[in-house]
Image (spheres, helix red, strand yellow):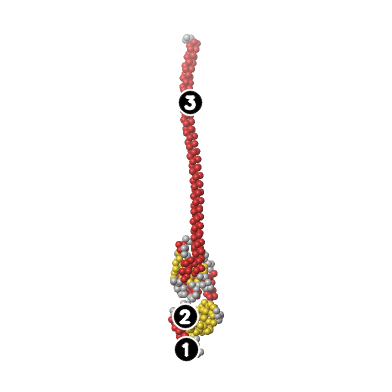
């Protein structure tokens, strides 16, 4: 091969693809492979190859699929220069062709990208913060949950499918964002964080695959670390994991698993509501029977008191009759006493007169009047 080299640093879809095309043209003419600067993302060994994404250092949404022979993977999240040949992969015959890089060699640059360990150290305080008990939101009558996901993505469908029949127990809104654009995710997340009291939980969900590393961008992690509303994540496939999962209060491997968990919580909530209603009816019936028993006791007491009052009234009537009879007898006694006193006074005067006559007669005999 000749000494010609094409140095390509991705800086946008148009420029990147243009430089790839230039590299292809150079390769077809017998020139040297192209050199591309980028960040190695998402390495996955398969068979006797290692596949990874080469990401634009400035624009995370600009990526090219790359692969190299062997099972040695490039350092995750490191800034590298790859020496590669451009290949084209037919995704759908007759419909689309996707460029990819056949990497011949990797050279790490002197400039390092932010590694996952560095990000973990930067957000260590947020990672160590106690997790919110997300299940407590179902104690509310109708919790409000907001899903951040790609517009028209499968995450929304996978979750809603599990919620069939329980829609009345949960308010579930979807806010479409560009999940491969960290700024879009962070901006939407911060806009929801001010709705404390209105939103009970925020869910970040998407399918796995390309662009999942956007959720490990500084702006996304910074937004998550400032959360005041509980957050759940369901990002990618079961083998995918991000720092966003570690920051979240509760995480699931796939959106379908989160949907099944929500269904289980809503089923438990429905059972609790039914049991509470049943217990309420039982308690109401028990209370009714208790009140009915108390009313029967009160009615019995009322009848007994009425009978006692009637008896007392009868005794009072007898007492009044006896009192009247006593008054009559007392009147008769008073009249008899008055008559006796009158007779005593009359006989007293008769006695006085008789005594006076006798004394006068005796004096007359003594004096000789007679």
Q: Is residue 128 above or below residue 36?
A: above
Nearer to us: label 1 or label 3: 1
What x and y, as percent, mark residue 127?
53, 70
Nearer to us: label 2 or label 3: 2
What x and y, as percent, mark residue 272?
50, 59
Q: Which mark is residue 90?
A: 2
Disc 1/disc 2 C-alpha distance (Å): 23 Å
Q: Is residue 53 above or below residue 165?
A: below
Label 1 crowd (10 A; few <14 / some 14-19 / many >=20): few
Disc 1/disc 3 C-alpha distance (Å): 159 Å
Decide which of tag 1 and tag 3 comes sooner along the chain: 1
| Residue at 52% over, 84% down | 104
Q: Is residue 152 above or below residue 82?
A: above
| Residue at 47% over, 75% down | 180
Q: Secondary structure at mark 3?
A: helix
What x and y, as percent, mark residue 253?
52, 70
Q: Which mark is residue 29?
A: 1
Of 113 and 234, nearer the camera is: 234
Q: Secondary structure at mark 1?
A: loop
Question: Mark 3 — residue?
Answer: 333
Decide which of tag 1 and tag 2 comes sooner along the chain: 1
Residue 85 visible in this rendered orientation of the protein:
yes
């Amino acid at each position: 091969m000749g000494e010609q080299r094409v140095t390509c640093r991705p800086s946008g879809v148009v420029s990147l693809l243009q430089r790839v095309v230039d590299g292809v043209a150079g390769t077809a003419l017998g020139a040297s492979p192209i050199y591309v600067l980028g960040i190695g993302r998402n390495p996955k060994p398969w068979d006797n190859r290692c596949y990874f994404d080469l990401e634009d250092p400035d624009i995370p949404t600009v990526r090219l699929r790359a692969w190299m022979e062997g099972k040695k993977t490039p350092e995750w999240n490191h800034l590298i220069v790859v020496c590669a040949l451009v290949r084209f992969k037919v995704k759908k015959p007759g419909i689309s062709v996707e460029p990819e890089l056949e990497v011949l060699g990797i050279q790490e640059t002197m400039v390092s990208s932010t590694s996952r360990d560095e990000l973990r150290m930067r957000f260590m305080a947020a990672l160590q913060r106690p997790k919110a008990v997300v299940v407590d939101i179902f104690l509310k009558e109708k919790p409000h949950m907001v899903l951040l996901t790609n517009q028209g993505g499968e995450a929304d469908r996978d979750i809603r499918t599990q919620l069939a029949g329980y829609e009345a127990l949960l308010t579930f809104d979807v806010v479409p964002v560009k999940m491969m654009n960290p700024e879009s995710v962070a901006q939407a997340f911060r806009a929801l964080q001010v709705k404390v009291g209105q939103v009970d939980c925020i869910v970040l969900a998407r399918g796995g695959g390309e662009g999942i590393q956007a959720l490990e961008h500084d702006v996304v992690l910074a937004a998550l670390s400032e959360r005041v509303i509980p957050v759940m994540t369901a990002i990618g496939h079961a083998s995918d994991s991000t720092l966003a999962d570690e920051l979240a209060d509760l995480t699931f491997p796939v959106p379908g698993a989160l949907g099944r968990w929500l269904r289980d919580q809503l089923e438990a909530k429905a059972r609790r509501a039914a049991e509470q209603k049943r217990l309420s009816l039982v308690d109401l019936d028990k209370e009714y029977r208790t009140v009915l028993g108390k009313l029967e006791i009160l009615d019995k007491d009322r009848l007994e008191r009425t009978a006692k009052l009637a008896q007392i009234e009868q005794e009072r009537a007898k007492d009044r009759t006896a009192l009247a009879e006593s008054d009559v007898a007392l009147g008769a006694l008073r009249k008899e006493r008055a008559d006796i006193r009158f007779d005593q006074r009359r006989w007293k005067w008769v006695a006085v007169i008789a005594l006076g006559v006798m004394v006068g007669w005796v004096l007359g005999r003594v004096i000789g009047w007679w």
